[in-house]
Image (spheres, grey):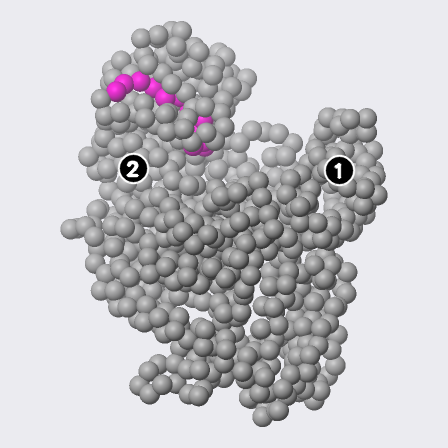
Amino acid sequence: MNACPPNEPCPRVAVRALCAFAARSGDLDLRFTPSPSAADGIAGHATVTSRRGPDYQRELPLAALCAGLQLQGRADGVDLVARRLEEIKTHRGDAQHIATNQRALHWAQAKLYGWMLCEQQGWDGLEVALVYFHIDTGEETVLTEWCEREALAAHAQDLCQRYRQWAHQEAAHRAARDAALAALRFPFGEFRAGQRELTEAVFRTQRGGRHLLAQAPTGIGKTVATLFATLRAMPEAQGDQLLYLTPKTPGRQLALDGLRRLNAQPLRVLERVARDKACEHPEAACHGEACPLARGFYDRLPAARQEAAQAAWLDAAALRRIALAHGICPYYLGQEMQRWADVVVGDVNHYFDISAQAWALAVAQEWRVHLLLDEAHALVERARGMHSAELNPASFEAARAQAPEALRREMARLHRHWGELGRDLHQPWQPLADLPQAFVQALRQHVGTLTDHLASHPSASAGALQTWLFDALQWLRVAETFGEHALADLSATPRLGRSAPRPRLAIRNVLPAPLLAPRWASAYSATLFSATLAPMDHIATLLGLPEGAARLAVPSPFPPEHLQVRVLPKVSTRYADRARSLPLVVRAMAEQFQAQPGNYLAFFSSFDYLQQALDAFAQAHPEVPVWQQARGPDEAARAAFLARFGPESQGIGFAVLGGAFGEGIDLPGRRLIGAFIATLGLPPVNPVNERLRERLQQITGHGFEHTYLYPGLHKVVQAAGRVIRTPEDQGVVVLMDDRFSRPDVRALLPPWWRL
């Protein structure tokens, strides 16, 4: 019964994957959401197993044949003398509030391991223990059951029968996928200049399991080149999944367009979007009593999963259509299909965030994951943001106002601890040498109480209380990794009601490297590419790339004469000089426009500076059409701004450097013929950035460069890269600041600019 069919391969499946597929039923229930991070889980397992006796074996490998499947996995802990197997799960809050379907999943895993151990040892039964370890208190809640081998075998057979057809389907899909990728052809008749060099370098490193930093000019087709090379490498590398990650939304669409053009059927492509953008009922909590798409989710999931697998192309629209047709949540259908996709296109946070699902899944399944990271220069700031957190007293006060009587005493206690921090704050912003441990402990206790309350009262699990809980959890998770790579500070806030003002409490990541190192180690191969990675030592140091990562700088394929780059040596855009230099900026823009009428982008360091320049220009030259970037992330306003850049139109669009229009937009041909850049792009000098500079100076010896110079010039080069998008494009870039004449600055600008 357990043997593989004759002449038919026996699919391998991990125990966790089998149970996640076949052992879940009922509602989607995320009331018990504050789960520990992956690092918490590892630490919790280590604590529990360290408490066991000398006969206890940790991470015991197990394998067995069942219903034509080759099962494999590692039991958390086994005592062969006592005939006892333990499945260890870490948690926060009251273990009694763990959702029923989640506990059923845990028992399914434990009993499956129990059957595999009985098979291995020849036992007729054993004790199976489910151990819940509270990550904050260290308390163990242990549930035990003596299980006969026959009952465990029936349990295993039932799960495997449910999974077997899917497993063979997926094995056939994998074989067909790899055959198609091995025969994949470049979708264009020939490579662009520089594109072949990039493609070959990506192929070699992705096939060989190395990491690569690749700088290549805008317009040579980096997206298609990197996708094609990686997909071709995957069959030879026996790769499981390709993650194409980008820090900004427009990059996702470019990747999807590239994948459509490659047309590597039967490749299964999944687009991941943020939960708040995919949610159909944002007013409802994620459980069956509140949301109709969570009710019976796991009962309807198999049919939706099968349709999604057959559809193969799962962009956000297709995923939503399939999910709603089956009455389930689109976001969590996407999370399920993350397990079964060949290519996942999404934001960088899906792999690099503290609780990133893509990374956790890759580690748990021991996959060979290939990473492609677009606009990699932006990963430094994004990674800092993911591993930073701030507690805002306004969020806490909103939660207090909504809190029932049962929570008020606990919240008042935290309020007092918070107030004690404010007594020592005598300036608007104040650094801390270390985290305030008394406050951290009070916050941790408060989170446990609030977690238990929300688990017991589903109707309260939306609104200010839940928002505050998630803020506090994120802060505590960041606090757990606090060290030399981070800073902590207090900042003053306005008085809220009659109480004394409570300060904001921030943890700011300075150096993402030590936190990202495990992510690079988990990836089989990663290619980080951008038009602006110079100097590469800066990116490699801050991101913690492993030593020996390959590097490539592709020369520009564009004729240098197609781009005129001029520096205005007598203009200073430093804050103190802006009023005096503004007439020179306006005159230079007007003269260029009059000499070559067309569409231009003008970049400034802030909205205030933008407004000053726009007002001055419009007053001096009312005949020239002008439009400006709106404040805030309004998609309609963004689209309207870009729509002004028509093939036959003329005018100047005013934008902020480093904003939505400084990168990731494509305006080829006559849609954009020039750019004015009235700033060096340096971040503002303020107490936070100065402390960041000091810490980076201590760690790397190049604090000013890492904090100010390199990030600023990356923005400049990205903005200038909007002008030349194809080999036929011609245009002009006017750099309006005397600092662009300095040798150290020019050394960081593209050599083909010929300044």
User: What residue is shown at x 67% (from left), y 73% (from top)?
Assistant: 130
Horizontal and vertical percent for residue 381? 52, 42
Could you classify mark 1 by the number of other residues whose Cα lies within 10 Å: few (under 14), some (14-19), or many (20 or more)?
some
Asked if residue 544 lies left or right of residue 46, the reply is left
- What residue sits right under mark 2 in the picture? 752
Tell which of 297 and 227 is nearer to you.
297
Tag 2's secondary structure? helix
Tag 1's secondary structure? helix
Tell which of 353 and 526 is nearer to you.
353
Indicate which disc residue 713 carries. Answer: none
Q: Quadrant of residue 619?
A: top left
Quarter containing the C terminus: top left
As shown in the figure, which amino acid type bears the numbered disc 1? Arg
Horizontal and vertical percent for residue 568? 38, 20
User: What residue is shown at x 47% (from left), y 77% (from top)?
Assistant: 160
Horizontal and vertical percent for residue 186? 21, 55
Asked if residue 251 lies left or right of residue 131, the reply is left
Horizontal and vertical percent for residue 61? 55, 80
Q: Is residue 312 above or below residue 569?
A: below
For marks 2 and 1, give the one nearer the viewer. Answer: 1
As shown in the figure, which amino acid type bears the numbered disc 2? Trp
- What residue sits right under mark 1 in the picture? 400
Tell which of 293 and 361 is nearer to you.
293
| Res. 93 visible in picture | yes
Give, as a single range, the part of the protein colored magenta: 649-660
Asked if residue 468 lies left or right of residue 370, the reply is right
First reached walking from the N terminus: tag 2 or tag 1: 1
